[in-house]
Amino acid sequence: MSDRYERGLAAYASQFGIDESEVEAWFEERFGRRFGAEAINAAGGAWGDGALSLRDRSLVVVTALIALGGVEQRLGRHVQWALEHGLTPEELEELVAFLAVYVGYPRASMGGAVVREELERRSGPA
């Protein structure tokens, strides 16, 4: 098993909140073994060491998912991960407001609803 693959297993285990030994089966059940292996390898490169911190990478991914729209379930877990990687609730809320200008209010409001949901889940209602 390559270092990249092992980094991918670690990244997905952290993101999904499961043990590394469960990641391959998680993917295989949902998408098949081949897709899972590709995704794990890709994550090993995308979330590995480099010029961007985990915090920066999380900021980029949350931004991309809000801009994409229609992936609210995935966005929720990435919001949780972004908080674990050091983004603050205030930064996430400001990001949503900022994105409204660039990706439109409908997508930003959907993303904002997910962000608020995750923040409330984490700390209780405001």
Image: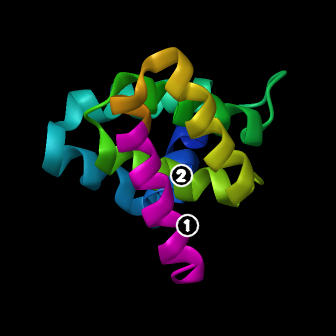
Q: Is residue 112 visible?
A: yes
Q: Is mark 1 on a helix, strand or loop?
A: helix
Single out the mark in the foreground, 1 or 2: 1
Residue drawn at x 32%, y 29% is 69
The residue carrying mark 2 is: 79
- Which residue range is magenta in the image? 109-126
Q: Is residue 2 visible?
A: no
Residue drawn at x 51%, y 27% is 100
Q: How far apart are marks 1 and 2 (CA)?
A: 9 Å
Q: Point out residue 31 in the picture as x, y percentages from the top left corner.
A: 16, 38
Q: Which of marks 1 and 2 is nearer the N terminus?
A: 2
Q: Point out residue 61 in the picture as x, y percentages from the top left corner.
A: 55, 31
Within 10 Å of disc 2 (Cα), the crowding (few <14, some 14-19, many 20+) is many
Residue type at tag 1: Leu
The residue carrying mark 1 is: 119
Report if the CB atoms under discs 1 and 2 are less than 8 Å apart. Answer: yes
Q: Is the magenta stretch mostly helix, strand or loop?
A: helix
